[in-house]
Amino acid sequence: MASAGDGRRGSIRQEPNGTWMFVLDTTPPGSKQRAQTRRRGFRTKREAQAALNDAVTALSAKIYVPPSRQRLGLFLSDSWLSAVETRLRRGTWESYRRMIRLHVNPHPIADVYLQAIEPGMLNAFYADLLAGSDGARPLAPRTVQYIHSIVHRGFRDAMRWGLIPRNPAASADPPRPQASDRRVIGTWNVDQLRRFLADTSAEELGALWHLYATTGCRRGELLGLRWSDVDLVRGRLAIVRTLVEVEPHGEDHVSWQFGEPKTSRGRRSIAVDAHTMALLKAHRKLQVQQRMKLRDVWQDYDLVFCRADGSPWHPKTVSTRFVDTAERLGMPHLSLHGLRHTWATLALGGNVHPRVVQERLGHSSVGVTLDIYSHVTPAMQSLAAEQVAALIYGQGE
């Protein structure tokens, strides 16, 4: 017999099959409706008594959580993702859903009861992801840490909802990414970029390549850009939304949605050079002609860059088109995201102030910018040393 100190009691007994169980009175103080918790399957009387004592202690401390048979995978995929969908940026939510589907649910840990997860189980799970067990490709430490952050957030909410007494992920040890773990994204030099833009300026997506290369915007930001966001007179873009790739689900099977920019700094105004604005104006003229030709079948999203019928481009399609176009022209391999890196590298190498680069890229802080483009800063350091020395010692000395 054990007591919670407020009159509520628990007891243990042996069942016909030889195992042991405990019964605990969990009726809330003042409640007229009696509640009990039963746990079965203990091999010995001592195990049952120890479990009862732990439950009584938790009940007295008001941290007791009734037993639940909800499994980790279903909790994350169904209960948790549904609950946090309206609290997260669409792209973030889709990323969480994809990571859970691809890396958590296929793993045996997904079938473990939520309340039975221990830090050691999570460490073993992370080790499997790093090693690429069961035929899966090994994941980078940075990716595994990201998965850990998702699981940690899920457990944190489960604890807040009274499903578990503590967050096991808080005591787990995910891998710590090193600076060397960051994937190096290639860039083009000025001559290569100039040649690509010249050879594609008259093509269907030529204006998009130019705007990408001269602003450093993200793919989704330009694919979600509307003509109402473009000031053709002053030469400025208002980045206020983004086109996000989503996994088709539901009845409409739509694989894209409009969402918020990636960071709070993502909502910004960007100046565009005169040459690129001229290309945009020519692009708009051709688009108006296409719209008049199609009339009723035109899908009016007011998009600057759209398919032939006015509907949004799928982000992956645009990335593939860029790579295929570069290959056709005999250019060095470069991803579409590499154009953004090319702009940033050229800007920093051309002595554009890092704060300006950060603002145009939409990074959350200038520290993020300098961390990503740390390979450019040594040259900036050398130039700064020479410029300041020239001021101190005088030109020509």
Image (tube, rainbow, N blue to C red):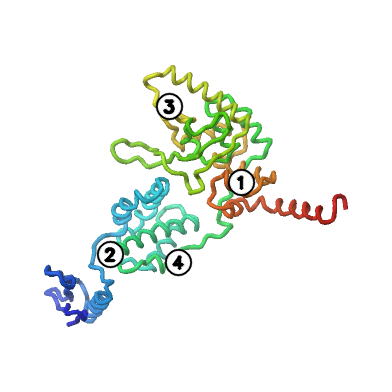
Quadrant (top left, top right, bottom left, bottom right) of the N terminus: bottom left
Give the mark, 4 or 3, whose residue is nearer the N terminus: 4
When the figure is inspected, residue 173 is found, relative to residue 101, above or below; the finding is: below
> In the drawing, what numbered circle is on residue 173?
4
Secondary structure beneath disc 4?
loop
Mark 1 burial class by Cα count in 10 Å: few <14, some 14-19, many 20+: many
Question: What's the residue at 70%, 51% (across, down)?
Answer: 380
Amino acid carrying label 4: it is Asp
Q: Which mark is residue 35?
A: none
Amino acid type, callout 2:
Gly
Q: Tell which of 313 and 331 is nearer to you.
A: 313
Q: Position of residue 290 (x, y in %)?
A: 46, 20
How many marks the image carries: the answer is 4
Residue drawn at (77%, 51%) of the image: 387
- Please tell me how crowded label 4 is: few (under 14), some (14-19), or many (20+) other residues with Cα within 10 Å: some
Residue designated by label 2: 162
- Who is closer to the viewer here, 170 or 110? 170
Whether residue 335 can be seen here: no
Q: Earlier in the sequence, mark 3 or mark 1?
A: 3
Do tag 3 and tag 1 residues touch (Cβ < 8 Å)?
A: no
Check the image and report above or below for 302 versus 100.
Answer: above
C-alpha span from label 4 to label 3: 49 Å
Of the numbered discs 4 and 1, the one sitting upstream in the chain is 4
Check the image and name the residue furthest to the right.
Answer: 397
What number is the disc on residue 357?
1
Question: Mark 2 falls on what kind of element?
Answer: loop
Q: Is residue 1 above or below residue 85?
A: below
**Amino acid type for the residue under numbered disc 1:** Val
**SS at mark 3 in the image:** loop
From the image, tell me which residue sits under label 3.
Answer: 310
As measured in the structure, the alpha-carbon distance from the residue carrying label 3 to the one carrying label 1 is 32 Å
